[in-house]
Image (spheres, grey):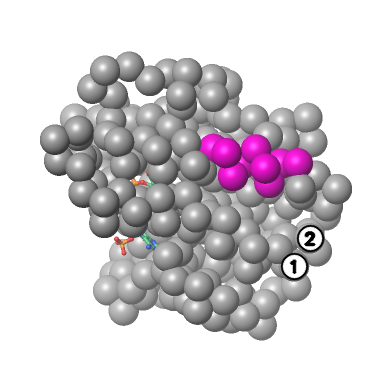
Amino acid sequence: MTIALITGANRGIGLEMAKQLVAAGTKVFATCRLPEQASALNDLATQNSSLVTVIQLDVINDMSVHAAAQAVAAETDHIDVLINNAGVNFRDNFEEFNSDEFLLSLNANGVGAMRVVRQFIDLLRKADSAKVVNISSQLGSITAQRPNFGSYAYNSSKAVMNMITRHLSFDLEKDGIITISMHPGWVQTDMGGPNAAVTPPNSAAGILKVTAGLTAEDNGKFYIYNGEIHPW
Ligand SMILES: NC(=O)c1ccc[n+]([C@@H]2O[C@H](COP(=O)([O-])OP(=O)(O)OC[C@H]3O[C@@H](n4cnc5c(N)ncnc54)[C@H](OP(=O)(O)O)[C@@H]3O)[C@@H](O)[C@H]2O)c1
């Protein structure tokens, strides 16, 4: 049985990925900041008690991530797929620069993924060929930047995540771990808004299809949810 862990699994793309993984028979450690408020996720867990374990995990809190890793290690000896999905978007522009929001964005969207991989590395190494999927964004692409395309804090934070993907792809290759960045599309979630182009089910299905098909040759690449390669 495939074993997956998702951050930010209580709503949006993360929740949809959890639903689809469970429907496919995958065991999911569905993590979120506030499990007691995660009603949709708790419903999924209640309906699929053998496949879903809800775990508290705040990606900006070292102790929370450490405790989550210990809780997961008590239930499984490995993780096949880690999806770093949690993210924030404050939508600043030049005039609205706010250093606290900028730093929080870097922490949650960039350092958060690194924090999670470091704490879960033992479980990833024990899988046959684990996959780390960092849910990034086209907005984190330096090549794709243009005027009025996203925000300083968010775009910078996803560029940080992309650099972390590249470094992890080098450092973890010897362990057989494949690390990629993934642009999920512009998706109809709280973050993407109602006018976004892609539904959460279509985005999640695409991400999971690409993830399932990853091989060692894909290590260190930047994918779009539809399977195309995104420029860095
Ligand atoms: N929607 C889009 O168009 C789009 C486009 C490109 C990339 N993305 C990326 O896709 C990912 C999912 O986005 P989404 O659209 O599903 O957004 P969303 O609906 O706003 O959900 C964001 C998720 O991240 C969680 N989160 C935020 N800060 C966290 C923290 N410190 N620790 C743990 N969880 C935290 C949220 O939990 P709470 O409920 O506790 O806040 C929520 O579960 C994000 O990384 C986002 O940047 C989205």
Q: Is residue 10 magenta?
A: no
From the image, tell me which residue sits under label 2: 125
Q: Is residue 96 left or right of residue 139?
A: left
Instruction: Name the residue nearer the viewer: 173 or 37.
Output: 173
Q: Residues within 10 Å of mark 1 (few under 14, many from 20)?
A: some
Residue 172 percent across, percent down from the top left: 76, 49
Residue 56 percent across, percent down from the top left: 44, 75
Circle 1 — which element? helix
Q: Residues within 10 Å of mark 2 (few under 14, many from 20)?
A: some
From the image, tell me which residue sits under label 1: 122
Which quadrant would the N terminus be assigned to in this image? bottom right
Which quadrant would the C terminus be assigned to in this image? top right
Instruction: Name the residue nearer the viewer: 226 or 102.
Output: 102
Q: Amino acid at mark 1?
A: Asp
Instruction: Name the residue nearer the viewer: 11 or 48.
Output: 11
Q: Are marks 2 and 1 in contact (CB under 8 Å)?
A: yes
Q: In the rendered image, is residue 213 in sight?
A: no
Residue for point 29% across, 70% down: 39
Residue for point 68% across, 34% down: 220
